[in-house]
Amino acid sequence: MTQKNILSKIFMFLVLVFNSSATASQADSKFGQNIDEIIVKSGLKRQIEQLPEVVSASFDERLSQEPAIKSEEAAKIRNILSQSYNPSAMLKSMKTDIAAGLTDKDIKPILSWLNSSLGRKITQLEEKASSGDAYREMQSFAAGLESNPPDPARIDMLERLDQAAHITEFSVRMKMHMVLIMTESMSSVAGKNDFSREQLLAQLKINRPKIEEASKQEAMISGLYTYQSLTDDELKEYISFYTSAAGVKYANVVTQGLLEALQNGSRDMGEKLGNLIQEEQNKPADVDK
């Protein structure tokens, strides 16, 4: 198989896998402590710590649909996934970006929400839903929705939450940025420029409608699964937080921080995949049969 074909194959597979982030202000120790508190009490810390597990579960799900990928190749890619998305590095990046994007004035209403009884309840639900086991349970949950469809009013409310928190919008941006950076890094390290940036962007543009549709469906399934124990009034209160001035800024800052952290991991993964491709290309022709 040529290097260009290998890159094409991995590019399309990555689209599928990802179709299922010290400034001067940190010198103030109290401010830094507040940022740490936001990261913990929002559930970001726990969710990022569980990210490698979730990515691995997503990879395994897609792998079951791609019999052409050999078990040896799959094991190597799985190992690269676990190494690239390092929670400690991601949390450090997140803290820097959140600290740069928020002021003391912003922090007070955000912590007020996170410390409220409903804020704590929602954080616990989101942390619980961000594990690898929960990801697999969510797939079974989704399969049962056809025979047990949700209340249309609930769907409408979750769509409002999606819009207020920019869940689908973030998901699409994340997937497209991750695949772009990963593939560029992979191609560069492999010493081959078969994929120009323009070609990658054109391919992602073609795939964008599918990515958007999948992301919207994923957001809905995730919302139905994660918040199934919340009442409609509780969901309305959650939406109210995200539509408040503090909630809007919080969502924007966290979204940008996550994108940055994930892009760093994607760049690292692309480089490791590029090295893997080089290793495969350097094997004697009669070894890889």
Image (cartoon, rainbow, N blue to C red):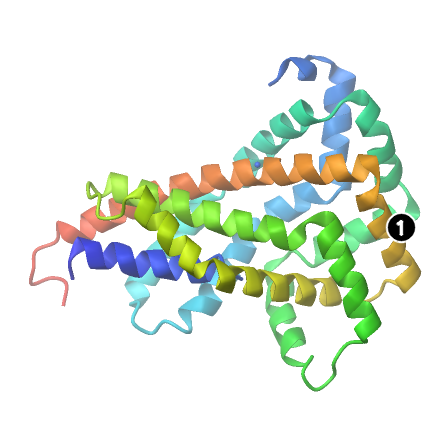
Answer with the quarter of the image where residue 145 lies.
bottom right
Rendering coords of residue 39 (x, y %): 71, 36
Rendering coords of residue 34 (x, y %): 78, 26
Rendering coords of residue 275 (x, y %): 26, 44
Comparing 222 with 27, the one in front is 222
Q: How many labels does the image show?
A: 1
Answer with the quarter of the image where residue 245 lies.
top right
Comparing 190 with 82, the one in front is 190
Residue drawn where x is 81% and y is 69% of the image: 154
Rendering coords of residue 199 (x, y %): 31, 49
Compared with 266, 172 (above or below) is below
Q: Name the residue under label 1.
A: 118
Residue drawn where x is 87% and y is 33% of the image: 109
Answer with the quarter of the image where residue 92 lies.
top right
Label 1 secondary element: helix
Which residue extends farthest bottom? 147
Q: Residues within 10 Å of mark 1 (few under 14, many from 20)?
A: some
Compared with 242, 20 (above or below) is below
**Left or right: 88, with 79 as reference point:** right
User: Image quadrant for the C terminus?
Assistant: bottom left
Compared with 128, 66 (above or below) is below
User: Image quadrant for the N terminus?
Assistant: bottom left
Residue drawn where x is 62% and y is 67% of the image: 217
**Left or right: 89, with 2 as reference point:** right
- Can residue 227 be seen? no
Compared with 280, 1 (above or below) is below
- Can residue 41 be seen? yes
**Left or right: 140, with 36 as reference point:** left
Comparing 36 with 192, the one in front is 192
Q: Which amino acid does label 1 sit on?
A: Leu
Residue drawn where x is 80% and y is 45% of the image: 242
